[in-house]
Image (cartoon, rainbow, N blue to C red):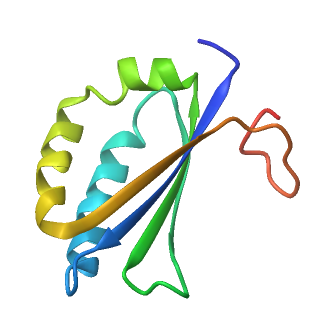
Amino acid sequence: MTNQQVQLNIRFKAKPGKKEEFRKELSSLIEEMSSEKAFISAIVSDDLDQPDDLIIYETWQGTRDSWLAEEFIKPYRKNYEGTLGDLIVDRSVSWLQPKGEWGSHITNA
């Protein structure tokens, strides 16, 4: 396994009245993906200024290409992706590579 790490910062805008239902779906996804060998951590946050927004910050062992080739294709992700149309308005993904870290030991930066 590579010593590289990749982080995903994903912002979701829930449909009105659907945030808590979406949060449950997201939590189920995290339960599934947290058992993956390359999984390191995930943090879910509410945006205090955008009440319909949820943000997940994931850290994975590997690269963007390895994540797309190995993790995105998992069957449980297909089921999750199928629920999103009813629950969210928008999703934006930022791919990050850690270069420094203070206060924790999540990354190898």
From the viewer's perspective, is residue 2 above or below residue 62?
Answer: above
Residue 23 in the image: state x and y as whole percent.
31, 70
Residue 25 in the image: state x and y as whole percent.
23, 62
In the current view of this chain or complex, which residue is farthest to the top? 1
47 left or right, relative to 18:
right
In depth, the one of 89 and 1 nearer the eye is 89
Residue 83 in the image: state x and y as whole percent.
13, 56
Residue 35 in the image: state x and y as whole percent.
40, 37
38 left or right, relative to 83:
right
Residue at the (13%, 44%) spot, across then down: 79
Image quadrant where residue 60 sits: top right
56 left or right, relative to 71:
right
Residue at the (23%, 39%) spot, across then down: 77
Residue at the (84%, 48%) spot, across then down: 101
Where the N terminus falls, by quadrant?
top right
Where the C terminus falls, by quadrant?
top right
